Image: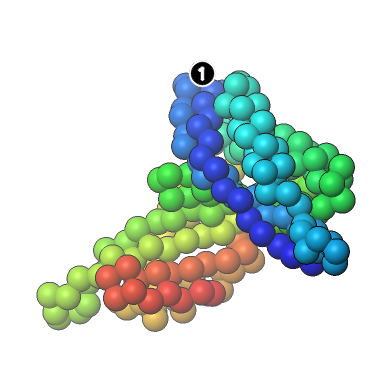
Amino acid sequence: MLQFVREIPVSIVLQSASSARRGFLFHMAVGFSKEVNPLSGMTVNLMLVDAWLGKLKADLESTAFHSRSDSLSHAFAEIMAVARLNLIEQCEAEEAQLISISFREERGWSFSWQHLQSPQEMTVTQPHFLEAFLQNTADFGLLKVEFAWNRVADCEADFSHEGFKILKTISARSVSELADKLAPLKEFRLSSGSSLQEIHIKHLSWQYCLSL
């Protein structure tokens, strides 16, 4: 099976429960898989795939998405459902398989789905930035802590806020101490049933990453 990913920009406007309008620039990356034809050496026609994504882009950009709350979580789930069902229908006609869909917002956060998840699930990844100062030195480091949440159906949690709540309770004098305190929180479950699946600590100044 040959797997490949195509990516295009998509601009989407959402309306929250308080009637506030929010605009987002996403990079939509879609993964496909199909057996290679032994005679032609070809898989899915890339021009056909680009046509699928172009039509989906037009549909998403012309649709009004409304959220049940100001967290916009429901609206993002609706966008994912529209994209997934649209592309699955196209794939079935070409005997291909939809492997993944990712919407990465220009400001660094994302929501995504991959074929091992149920249709009701998706992963929401939120970055948080911390300033790290080494004790008794003038050295400074910028840390990016990424929380990847597995969102279940009907969850209206504000995952950015949930991440801030976690970090607010933690005090650490080093990256290793921060990792030690965050590690037990993996699989932390919210009342909605959504859970914290992955934690990544990226030291942007020193260019290394710890994954928990």
Q: Is residue 46 above or below residue 184?
A: above
Asked whether residue 88 is in view, the answer is: yes
Nearest the eye: 124 or 54: 54
The spot of residue 113 in percent (x, y) is: 68, 52
Quadrant housing residue 64: top right
Q: Is residue 90 above or below residue 132?
A: above
Q: Taking 50 as reference, is 184 left or right?
A: left
Q: In which quarter of the image is the C terminus?
A: bottom right
Quadrant housing residue 176: bottom left
Q: How many labels does the image show?
A: 1
Nearest the eye: 45 or 111: 45
The spot of residue 81 in percent (x, y) is: 73, 38
For the point 43% across and 70% down, which residue is it? 201
Residue furthest left in the image: 138
For the point 61% across and 51% down, which residue is it? 6
Question: Disc 1 designates what residue?
Answer: 19
For the point 81% across and 61% down, which residue is it? 40
Q: In which quarter of the image is the N terminus?
A: bottom right
